[in-house]
Amino acid sequence: MKQKLFSLLILFFLLFSITACSSPEKKKAAHFQKAIAYIEHNENKAAIIELQNAIKIDPKFADARYRLGLLYLKEGNAQSAFQELQRAASLDPDNLDANTKVAEFYLLSKKTDESRKQIEAVLTKKPDYADGLALLANLELMAGNFQKAEAAVNSALLQSPESDRFYNIKGRIYFAQKDFPQAEGMFHKAITFGPDNYSNYNILAVFYEQQNKIDEVEKLLGEMIKKFPKNTQPYMMLAGLYQNKKQFDLAEQNLKKVIELAPDNVPFRLLLVEFYKGLGKTDTAFSSLTQDIKDLPDSLDLQSELANLLFDQNKFDEAKTRMDALLKKNSKHGGANLLQAKFLLNEKKFHDSIAILDSLVKDYPKWAEPSFYLALAHLSLGEMELSQKAIEDALQKAPRNTKFHTLLAQIMLMQGNSDLAKKEGSIALQLDPHNFRAAMLLSQAMLQAKEFDKAVDLLVKMSAQVPDNLEIKGNLGLAYLGLKNKEKATEVFTRLLELSPENSRALALLASLSANGDFKKAVDLVKKQIAKAPKAGGHYLLLGDLYLKQKMFDDALGAFNKAKELLPDNPQPYLVIAAIMRQTGKVDQAISEYKELIKSQPNSGNAHMGLATLLETKGDIPEAKKEYGETLRIKADFSPAANNLAWLLAQEENADLGEALRLAMIAKQQFPEEPHIADTLGWIHYKRQAYSLAQSQFEQALTPNPDDPTINYHLALALHGANVKDKAIASLKKALAFQGDFKERKTAENLLKQWEKE
């Protein structure tokens, strides 16, 4: 009844004012007075309209702009509030509150110079203005001027000795100086003088958390929940606390309580979904998200999260259907566009994916996920520097994300920076002890750093947790090789072949260990393994290589042709067959056969590939490049053609190393362990003067065949480029020690003489 009466009075006042007020000045005053009346009865929206009307009549009406700014601030419209308060402050320099609030806005926007200029003008007018002194204290605190900050807040306290806000600031000043007892005392004083101010409790909770006083944090949060039962933040902090303590049931309870208190808050619901995903409870995350969408069916963010979750579960068709529906509703939706970028990554359309991700990074500067996928896209293109920059940006936004640290560890490992790879792998494991990928990268970094004993310790522990894991066994065998423990290495590689009979890398290493230079014994071992795994093309590559070393060309051709049949996408058999044809004088005959085949089957990628390889062998590089191009036209990601064309491009004067790198990365994605591809990629890195990257690739290429003279020669060049001269000379000597054909021998001999004189 009271509200109704007030509305009638306002209506009467409006009618009266229409007839009574004729001059602009009177109309302006009438709108302003009505606004004041509305403000007194908390009718803010009506008050805003009246103030806007007053300002239309007089744009320089400072008091109206000031009050309008305060109303906008109360309504949460920060941008409009700042505009009005800034105008009010310029129109009325004596309005200290307006000027101080403008300074606060500048401070929040990190425009500290503008903030300082504004507040100094206020304090010039009134040096003891408490609110101005408080802001100055915050500015000095941010600048690290602790004595000036304390002097300012002490002056403010002289004006308002029972103001909780000033004790809060003083506590933060002591905290920044690591005077923890004094800081804690000030925070308690702030609570004493401001028992109903949530921020006073919050800063004390943060203080205890950073002091690692977990019991005090938990106790205080309990008090905060009793004091502020409808505030979600204490429950959020408790959830984080219990998550760190691995008390996941309690963390889940508190996250659910947050949703109970704010059921319409979508970010809170997404936080619970991320919690379940982090625990590996994908089904629970899916169920939770499904219920969320039932509760809030209009939320595109929830629907986007579901589509992304389906994508991560490899349910691509359903994910794409949902993504298309989302983009139809809102073509600029961040989550839907991120999913589109992920689909493009899957389809190897890296440049298209990067275009979307760059926009997302720009449009959502605090969102870390786009930067993570941007790093993946650049990595796929071999753009290491850009990839590293993107993942470091993701980590700035989300420093506790184990997935991000894992990717950075991988990038560091690929760059040959074993120290940083170990550091990032260790951080990832601390954040998530179950992060298998991080543990593997850490072990590989130890191998790269030649810390074989540490690698063995870690891999043995991992093997106890995940018995008979093939990747662990493979790295453990390499670690034992590094320690020159041939017995243990043989035992591990033998077990690895029992678990995975088709593992050609393990077979190569075992053959090298067991045969010890006896080719017949090695051939017998490989043949026995072929009987166990007749479709393992890599075994035939190894067999062909053993025959080739004994100059048994017909047997080698038979083995490599079988390998080509089983591994049509692998470049090695094509390369070696071409070399054998050249060595046995059958190149022209083979070229004619391929050309005949292409006449009848112009889209035969294998025919173009075989012809390209032989043309390259014969030295007809332009035609070889043309045929490799034809092969890639037929199949854009055909690894052998991509690798070989990348190699040819890298040999040219004024080479297009960017295109060569792109092609080499296509090959690398298909066969990450293939030594010839690693050698090609290493050579391109070497030509780009990225010596650590080159070294890493050459060392990988040497793993299955450590005596290869050409790759040892390439490694020597990379080491010399990196100014690691002793190791460079050692690698060059190893290349020259090879007894067979080595076309770079003369150059290597001259380099050795030159380097030994340096």
Image (cartoon, rainbow, N blue to C red):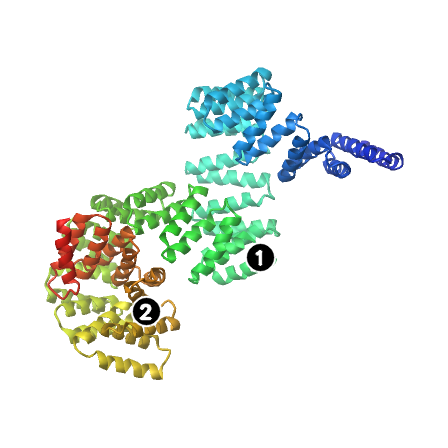
Give the residue displayed 44% in from the left and 40% down from the top. Answer: 248
Q: Is residue 484 left or right of residue 415?
A: left
Give the residue displayed 44% in from the left and 53% down from the top. Answer: 374
- Rendered location of residue 740, percent (x, y): 12, 65
For disc 2, the neighbor class at 10 Å (few under 14, some 14 to 19, many from 20) is many
Q: Is residue 671 above or below residue 595?
A: above
Instruction: Report the amino acid beneath label 1.
Output: Ser
Question: Dividing the picture into quarters, in which one does residue 16 lie?
Answer: top right
Q: Secondary structure at mark 1?
A: loop
Give the residue displayed 55% in from the left and 38% down from the top. Answer: 257
Q: Nearer the viewer, residue 543 or 214?
A: 543
Q: Residue furthest right?
A: 19
Instruction: Report the amino acid beneath label 2.
Output: Ala
Q: Is residue 163 left or right of residue 412?
A: right
Give the residue number, with chain letter if any, for mark 2: 641
- Rendered location of residue 181, percent (x, y): 44, 20
Q: Is residue 649 above or below residue 42?
A: below
Q: Nearer the viewer, residue 588 or 253?
A: 588
Observer-side mark, 2 or 1, equals 2
Q: Is residue 510 above or below residue 132?
A: below
Q: Is residue 608 above or below residue 454?
A: below
Compare marks 2 and 1 and give the one earlier in the sequence. Answer: 1
Check residue 331 in the rendering and tell me which mark sits there, or answer none. 1
**Res. 199 in view:** yes
Q: Nearer the viewer, residue 77 or 653?
A: 653
Q: Is residue 352 left or right of residue 492?
A: right
Q: Quadrant for the N terminus, please.
A: top right
- Residues under numbered marks 2 and 1 in contact, where contact means CB atoms less than 8 Å apart: no
Inter-mark Cα distance, 2 to 1? 38 Å
